[in-house]
Structure formats: structure tokens, C-alpha cells
Image (cartoon, rainbow, N blue to C red):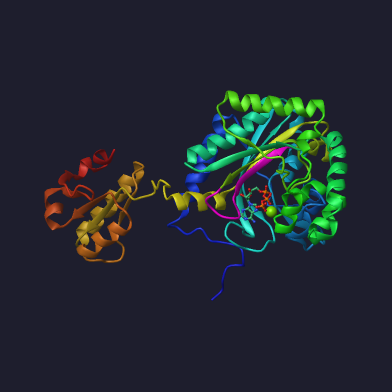
Amino acid sequence: MITLPKGTKDVLPDNSYKWQFVENTARETAKVFNAKEIRTPVFEHTEVFARGVGETTDIVNKEMYTFLDKGGRSVTLKPEGTAGVVRSFVESGLYAGALPLKTYYITPCFRYERPQAGRLREFHQFGVEFFGSTDAGIDAEVILLAKTFLDKLGVKNITLYINSIGCKECRKEYHNALKAYLQKNYDKLCDLCKDRYEKNPMRILDCKNENCKAITENAPSILDYLCDDCKAHFDRVQSLLKAAGVEYKIDPKIVRGLDYYTKTVFEFVSENIGAQGTVLGGGRYDGLVEQFGGGKIAGIGFAAGIERLLLLLESAGDIPNDNNLTVYIAPMGDDARLKAFELVTALRGAGISAETDYMNRGIKSQFKYADKLGAKFVGVLGSDEIAGGVIKIKNMQSGEEQNVPFGSVTEFFR
Ligand code: ATP
Ligand code: MG
């Protein structure tokens, strides 16, 4: 038997309604915030991510699916959504249009990671990217969009953590303070963090290694080093969140795993799904568009992991399933089969989901099959019904039966 590659999953027909629920909710939420969908390729030139996501990140260092195509070009399967969207924003000249521009995407992502619950090699993200405004109101909107999405999904027991990681200027001073603090324990840091110490010391705060966590416990806080502008921005974001009635906690250790973030960063974390508890993360990236040659244009966004959301929703067990069949038509005999075919065709034409028998089942096993399909109604067509020009429709929930003339069947289900 040929099997799935490690770290990938099929979405089987019985489960796809869950994905559709999350995706539809994402689209509806984006729409009320006036965000429009953007689709970018699944693979890009490797430098889009190497430069965009940042050379010092775990993603670029260890996790990318990079290969040479037959023309000898280095290409990479997208490990996240932002870099490709920014590449497109610049390449398509969208920055010259009306701003702010609000975009969203639903996309597969690929990272070569050690597979475990909530950590796959192919996973999916719903993300948004808003371009062109440095106003704190946009930060608050992006966070609110995320919260609205999670609320509409029915996600419970989830906490919003926010932080500001400042701009290049305030971060310089903070890096020095952090490195001075970490220096005495440098030898005890994990190998990865030893590497981060020079390249990107703030990332050490986010290390999942217990030793590193203990070492950074009392590390200096970025919030004590913010410049006036970054501090005012962070205060404003908080006022707006309060005005909107959004509860949050400030966590100065939230730094995000990508190099492009500035000022506001945030995560929604669940206590219900174990170690991989971050279901949604985002922040501001005011330097990224410029890095792609698009001028000084601000950006902010988030990405939510759909598999992790589904873990949460499945453990809560309430994902609405409206994929169930409306009516199964059970014919007996050749005349009835022909009539059943006519009726399902008419019903489907009217937008009503309908099914009939193609396995030559007896009436009893047709009822069983209809039950498996979750059919709300079963219509029985025997020789009596054909002779009377009616179909006997049974409501599977109430057990009620009713003879409906052929000409009124579509009407009956409207
Ligand atoms: P983590 O710290 O868990 O590795 P991350 O910081 O790498 O997460 P982001 O790059 O911010 O994650 O991606 C946004 C979201 O995508 C995460 O919050 C998570 O829900 C989801 N995600 C990230 N990596 C994976 C993965 N390998 N498998 C499934 N979902 C993932
Ligand atoms: Mg990661």
C-alpha cells in the first residue's frame, strides 16, 4: 500500500464539513471587515522567504521545503503566507492603489518539522494582511477580526496575549540589556539559543526548552525600553481594545518566530490542546514592504492554524454539519427507478440535495443506507405509489408519513 508522506493528512469526505465550516467562517469574517481575498502561488523563489521571513528564523534555517526545479532554480513551498502576499503587493503595484488595502488568504503551508499533535508538515492557515496604515486603529481592527473569527467559530477558553516589540531603535537598546542579562548563563542555553544570542537574542524568550525558559524567567522586559512613539502606539492599541470590550493580557515574552515584526505582536492561546496551544499569531511588520522594494508602507496581519483550530473545535464537539442529505428516494422495481431518477433530477435542479439507489438494494437496506447518509426524509416509490402518482415521504425524525403527488415534490421541500 502506498501511504501518506509523514506529517500530512487527508481530509476525508465525512470530515470535510468541518473544514468548510472554518473556511466559510473565515470568509464571512473577512468580508464584514472589508478584506478581500488574495491568492499567491504555493511555491516562490526561495529568496522571497529567505529574505522575507528572515535568515535567522527557525523556518528559514531548518523548516523549509526547498528544491531545485528542472531549470536549476531554487524554489520553496510556502512555509507561511505573509512573504508571498508582500511580494505580490509590491510586484502588482497594489501599493500605488487606495490604502489601506485589506487582504486575506486561506492557504496550505509547508514546514519540515517533527510531526506531533498540532504540528504537521503540510498545514493550513487563514491569514490577513492589512497594508498602508501606521494607525493603531488598524492594529485593533486586525486583533478584532481575529477575535470575531474565533468567537464565530465558537472557540472557548482562549486568551489573547499582546505585546510590543518596539521598532529598530528601541530594540537596539533592549538587545544590549537582554544580552547583558543572559551572558552569565550563556553556557546553559540550548545550542539554538546560543546561535540566537548574537543573531536575534529576543527569540530566546520564545524558546520551548525548559532550561532556556528558566533562564529567561526574570529577563528585562521590552516594555521598559520602548521609545516614546512605540509606547504611545501600544497605549493607543490598548485603549481601542478596551473600547471594543476585548479582554487581553500583556505578555512581554511574546516575540513571534519571524524576523519582520515591529511594534504590536499578539497571540491567541488555548489551554485545551496541550503544548501546541497557539492557534493564531500576528503582528505589525512596518519594514517588510520596503524590504521587497515597495517603499515605506506599513503592514500588519495574523495567521491562524486551521488544524489547531479544528483540534479545539473537535474537543468541544460542536461543529455544525449542514452537509446532510435532504431526501433519499427509495425505488422498488424498474418503473420506480425511472421515476426516482426523474425526481432526484428535478429536486437537484431546485437546489435540494437528493439521492437514490444505484446498488440494487432491497427496501430495508435502502432505509439503512439513507440513515447512514443522514437523510432527513426518505421517499418510498413502490408499484402502489407509481399507480397513484404519488411518493410516500417519511420524515426520519418524527416518523410522520405523507403521500405527495409527483408534481408537488419539489414544492414539499422548499
Ligand atoms: P509554533 O511556535 O507553535 O511553532 P509558529 O510561531 O511557528 O508556531 P506561526 O509561524 O506564527 O507559528 O504560524 C501561525 C499559526 O500557524 C500558528 O499559531 C499555528 O496555529 C499554525 N502552525 C504553525 N506551524 C504549524 C505546523 N507545523 N503544523 C500545524 N500548524 C502550525
Ligand atoms: Mg514554528
Is residue 314 left or right of 116 when viewed as pictured?
left
- Residue 273 is inside the magenta segment: yes
- For this orientation, the residue located farthest to the bottom is 1
- Residue 129 is inside the magenta segment: no
Instruction: Kindly indicate the quadrant of the structure image that contains residue 405.
Output: top left
Q: Looking at the image, can residue 344 be seen? A: yes
**Within the displayed image, which quadrant is ligand 2 positioned in?**
bottom right
Query: Which residues lie in the magenta part?
Result: 271-284
Residue under the point 87% across and 46% down: 180
Q: Looking at the image, can residue 59 be seen? A: no
Q: Quadrant of the C terminus?
A: top left
Is residue 227 left or right of 312 when viewed as pictured?
right
Instruction: Kindly indicate the quadrant of the structure image that contains residue 220.
Output: top right
Above or below residue 97? Residue 364 is below
Is residue 353 left or right of 118 when viewed as pictured?
left
Residue under the point 80% across and 58% down: 189
